[in-house]
């Protein structure tokens, strides 16, 4: 579940800051973030956060926020799959608001180009290099075919055409996994990184070098000179990328945090107190 926990932390921080709002359930009068098309059904790992929170509540009632639990879980997921560790500042408090309507405007899209990605990250106080560095998390986990099938079939409205920026052998492989949406309603998943799908490493950038970025937003990193240079650096210096990734995760985990008397510390991550 490592990929799911890292992604959940990212999706939490980019909407209302790192306040655990992505963990709240919808109510009769409100549709929450977790039920956005960007999160449901693709976000996974909620039960892990809930179980960890339950243990903490039994030992240290209302001391550790759900937002902190999520940040710690993402750090541990990085450590367990990448072999490197970073310290996470604590003290976040939980927000009381979660709105499905705010998700799509704040999260980058899998079809984004570099300019759009840069704008989304800059809006959260993150640099272009942070964006390229954090994109490396796509070396873990899977994606539904529907997120990139337009690159395999009918690209630019041309019947049967594939995205020319994608390696032709990779296209043939993906077509064996993802049926043409024109003739099938199935939406299976494939690994974001076919080389080391369960390890957090720099193979994501190696894949980009060989035109094997799965999502449009992945391969887009090679299409602008400044981001392409960063991609090549990460190909050649895997250990340096790991160091940068750790620092970028800490910066991301500090976006618009609630502290002091702001928000609350939830007893349950699914509902406000």
Image (tube, rainbow, N blue to C red):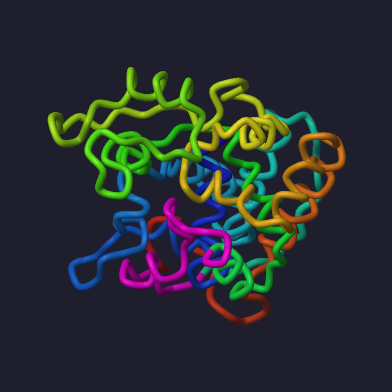
Q: Nearer the viewer, residue 192 or 63?
A: 192
Rendering coords of residue 141 (x, y %): 51, 32
Would residue 91 appear left or right of 35 to someone viewing this image?
Answer: right
Rendering coords of residue 106 (x, y %): 46, 69
Q: Nearer the viewer, residue 268 or 204?
A: 204
Is residue 100 located in the magenta-colored stretch of the structure? Answer: yes
Would residue 181 appear left or right of 109 to someone viewing this image?
Answer: left
Which quadrant would the C terminus be assigned to in this image? bottom left
In the image, what residue occupies the spot 81% across and 49% down? Answer: 244
In the image, what residue occupies the spot 26% across and 66% down? Answer: 31
Specify start and end residues of the magenta stretch as a single range.
Answer: 95-116
Would residue 125 appear left or right of 86 to someone viewing this image?
Answer: left
Q: Nearer the viewer, residue 87 or 58?
A: 87
Rendering coords of residue 157 (x, y %): 25, 48
Is residue 164 located in the magenta-colored stretch of the structure? Answer: no
- The part of the image, by quadrant, that contains residue 197 is top right
Rendering coords of residue 110 (x, y %): 44, 51
Would residue 21 appear left or right of 207 to someone viewing this image?
Answer: left
Number of on-image labels? 0
In the image, what residue occupies the spot 57% across and 60% down? Answer: 114
In the image, what residue occupies the spot 74% across and 56% down? Answer: 248
Q: Would you place residue 176 above or below residue 179 in this image?
A: above
């Amino acid at each position: 579940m490592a990929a799911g926990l890292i992604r959940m932390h990212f999706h939490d921080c980019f909407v209302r800051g790192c306040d655990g709002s992505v963990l709240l359930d919808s109510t009769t009068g409100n549709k929450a973030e977790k039920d956005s098309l960007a999160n449901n059904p693709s976000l996974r790992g909620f039960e892990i956060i809930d179980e960890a929170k339950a243990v903490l509540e039994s030992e240290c009632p209302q001391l550790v926020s759900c937002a902190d639990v999520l940040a710690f879980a993402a750090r541990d997921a990085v450590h367990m799959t990448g072999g490197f560790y970073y310290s996470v500042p604590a003290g976040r408090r939980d927000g009381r608001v979660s709105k499905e309507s705010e998700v799509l405007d704040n999260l980058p899209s899998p079809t984004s180009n570099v300019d759009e990605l840069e704008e989304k990250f800059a809006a959260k106080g993150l640099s272009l290099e942070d964006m390229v560095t954090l994109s490396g998390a796509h070396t873990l986990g899977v994606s539904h075919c529907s997120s990139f099938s337009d690159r395999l079939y009918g690209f630019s409205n041309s019947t049967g055409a594939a995205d020319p920026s994608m390696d032709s052998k990779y296209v043939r492989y993906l077509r064996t996994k993802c049926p043409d949406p024109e003739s099938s309603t199935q939406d299976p998943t494939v690994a974001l990184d076919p080389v080391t799908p369960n390890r957090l490493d720099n193979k994501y950038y190696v894949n980009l070098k060989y035109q094997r970025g799965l999502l449009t937003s992945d391969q887009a990193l090679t299409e602008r000179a400044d981001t392409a240079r960063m991609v090549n650096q990460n190909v050649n210096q895997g250990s340096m990328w790991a160091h940068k990734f750790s620092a970028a995760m800490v910066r991301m985990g500090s976006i618009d945090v609630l502290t002091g008397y702001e928000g609350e510390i939830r007893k349950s991550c699914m509902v406000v107190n």
